[in-house]
Image (cartoon, rainbow, N blue to C red):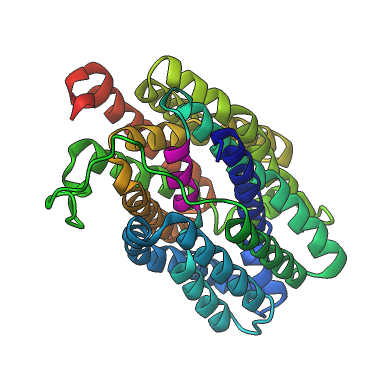
């Protein structure tokens, strides 16, 4: 298949995947209180648990699915993930207690792995000189789902109830399953691909490559920042909005601002990284996002907070495309499934610890402290990448 056709198909796939996720996940705290009867005093703990269990299980499963993908086919693993996640969303719409919701989220963690397969397939189809732009487009589309999803989730919740969002999300993932089954083909290996050595066949081989190990740790911490606010941000928006009506819709709009910014900026960040350096792109994006996040807790009203959410989205969009491109460039073709499975696992560790840390900070220090906490982590990461891979140039060839 032509790489541009594959990029177009995967872009649609990623949009459906991301929109189905973001029409549900940001509203879990409200779902817990309005549909499952959780008291306001307990919602932060239940929301943090519901967020985190998925990441914990998927962190264990993702490397396993990645190795199976390298042996049995990346397309097959994408089909598996699409179908099982679709089923999990349907179950999410019929639960009647917070305990049942946690069990559904556990199953989602077992089923996860669609995004790393999308990345692995695209990195094998894309020409090297188009890799950064291709990954930037996919990251931008992933973020664009963050625009469509919360808006659609908010509208559906107001019109038909929050459970409807789960069923629509399940339908979107089932469409992805059909696309991988009947349209998208298994990516070909490059003509000069050599068989794996005995060392490369080891499950820990990729972790022993210094630059891959470092990028996975950076990605873990960046993902932790992304999710540190997730369990409580709808509650924070509710606090800023005061007595505003249609709070679910308002929260959806604020979420979407970051998605709009990211969808615009991610391809541009990818192009910038291709032309200058993926390390410079990564460092600049984390510096700007960290500064904006550190200041985001200052506003006491919703409008300036929403404007800063747009700014955070602009800058955070540059982090993951650069990380993905660096990892793809330093990984053998036959191990793309494994490496993106490991990367996904690393990100899930961040997604697991982020909501827990966010819940603890919000509960014991106050929600305002979440923003400088998240910003400081990003600024330290930017300083580390600048020191190791820009100032110390030889480290980039590890």
Farthest left residue? 198
Secondary structure character of the magenta stretch overall = helix
User: Which residue range is magenta in the image?
Assistant: 115-125
Q: Percent position (x, y) of residue 201?
A: 19, 54
* Above or below 109: residue 348: above
Farthest top residue? 276
Q: Is residue 329 visible?
A: yes
Apparent side of residue 260 relative to residue 111 in the rendered image (left or right): right
Apparent side of residue 22 relative to residue 218 in the rendered image (left or right): right
* Above or below 205: residue 91: below
- Which of 332/398 is in front? 332
At x 36%, y 37%, the residue is 190
Q: Quadrant of the C terminus?
A: top left
Would you say residue 264 sits in the magenta stretch? no
Q: Is residue 361 visible?
A: no
Locate residue 230: give its quadrant. bottom right
Would you say residue 119 sits in the magenta stretch? yes
Locate residue 309: give its quadrant. top right
- Which of 51/71 is in front? 71
At x 80%, y 55%, the residue is 243
């Amino acid at each position: 298949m032509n790489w541009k056709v594959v990029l177009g198909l995967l872009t649609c796939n990623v949009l459906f995947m991301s929109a189905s996720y973001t029409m549900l996940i940001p509203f879990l705290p409200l779902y817990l209180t309005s549909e499952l009867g959780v008291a306001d005093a307990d919602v932060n703990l239940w929301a943090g648990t519901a967020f985190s269990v998925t990441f914990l299980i998927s962190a264990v499963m993702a490397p396993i699915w990645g190795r199976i993908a390298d042996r049995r086919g990346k397309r097959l693993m994408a089909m598996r993930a699409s179908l099982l996640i679709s089923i999990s969303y349907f179950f999410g719409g019929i639960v009647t207690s917070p305990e049942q919701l946690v069990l559904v989220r556990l199953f989602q963690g077992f089923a996860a792995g669609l995004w790393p397969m999308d990345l692995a397939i695209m990195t094998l189809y894309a020409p090297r000189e188009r890799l950064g732009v291709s990954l930037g487009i996919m990251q931008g589309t992933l973020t664009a789902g963050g625009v469509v999803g919360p808006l659609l989730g908010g509208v559906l919740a107001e019109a038909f109830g929050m459970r409807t969002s789960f069923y629509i999300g399940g339908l979107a993932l089932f469409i992805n399953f059909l696309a991988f089954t009947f349209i998208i083909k298994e990516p070909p290996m490059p003509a000069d691909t050599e068989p794996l050595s005995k060392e490369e066949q080891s499950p820990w081989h990729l972790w022993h490559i210094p630059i891959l190990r470092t990028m996975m740790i950076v990605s873990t911490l960046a993902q932790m920042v992304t999710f540190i606010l997730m369990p409580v941000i709808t509650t924070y928006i509710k606090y800023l909005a005061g007595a505003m009506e249609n709070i679910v819709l308002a929260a959806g709009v604020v979420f979407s601002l970051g998605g709009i910014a990211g969808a615009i900026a991610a391809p541009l960040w990818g192009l910038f990284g291709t032309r200058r350096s993926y390390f410079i792109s990564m460092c600049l994006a984390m510096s700007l996002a960290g500064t904006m996040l550190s200041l985001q807790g200052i506003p006491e009203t919703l409008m300036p907070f929403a404007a800063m959410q747009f700014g955070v989205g602009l800058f955070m969009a540059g982090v993951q495309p650069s990380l993905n491109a660096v990892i793809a460039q330093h990984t053998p073709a036959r191990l793309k499934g494994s490496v993106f499975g490991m990367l996904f696992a690393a990100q899930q560790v961040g997604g697991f610890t982020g909501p827990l840390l966010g819940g603890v900070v919000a509960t014991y220090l106050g929600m305002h402290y979440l923003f400088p906490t998240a910003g400081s982590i990003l600024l330290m990461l930017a300083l580390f990448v600048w020191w190791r891979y820009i100032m110390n140039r030889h480290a980039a060839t590890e």
